[in-house]
Image (cartoon, rainbow, N blue to C red):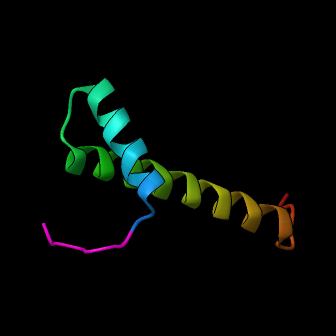
Amino acid sequence: MKTLSVRLPDQYIHDIEEVAGQELVDNGAMVRKLIGSGLKEYRIKKAFESYLFSPCTILA
């Protein structure tokens, strides 16, 4: 696993700490979970957009 440093607004830090406490995990684990969820959502959105806006052919 590699390390990545980012600057986040204070509100993001507060929210991460809050949800990490609710999930009973540390902040790092919560950030990894949130990034994983965000990446999955992003990929689904891009695939959907690609499907919607690309020319379609029907093979018979």
What span is in magenta? 1-7
Is residue 49 found left or right of 31 in the rendered image? right
Is 29 located above or below residue 46 in the figure? Answer: above
Is residue 57 visible in this depiction of the protein?
A: yes
Counting from the top left corner in percent of width and height, residue 42 is at: 57, 59
Residue 39 screen position, x and y as percent: 47, 58
Quadrant of the drawing holding the N terminus = bottom left
Quarter location, residue 54: bottom right
**For the image shown, how many numbered marks are present on the structure?**
0
From the viewer's perspective, is residue 29 above or below residue 10?
Answer: above
**Residue shown at 39% from the left, 46% from the top:** 14
Residue 19 quadrant: top left
- Nearer to us in this view, 53 or 58: 53
Q: Foreground: 35 or 47? A: 35
Q: Is residue 5 magenta?
A: yes
Q: Is residue 31 above or below residue 7?
A: above
Q: Is residue 56 visible?
A: no
**Position of residue 34 measured from the top left corner of the image (x, y, whole percent):** 40, 48
Q: Quadrant of residue 9?
A: bottom left
Q: Quadrant of the C terminus?
A: bottom right
Residue 47 is left or right of residue 7, and the answer is right
Of residues 12 and 34, the one drawn nearer to the viewer in this rendering: 12
Seen from the viewer's position, the closer of residues 7 and 34 is 7
Q: Is residue 20 magenta?
A: no
Q: Residue at x 36, y 72 (%)?
A: 7
Q: Residue furthest left?
A: 1
Residue, x 36% and y 35% (percent of image)?
A: 18
The residue sitting at 75% across, 63% down in the picture is: 49
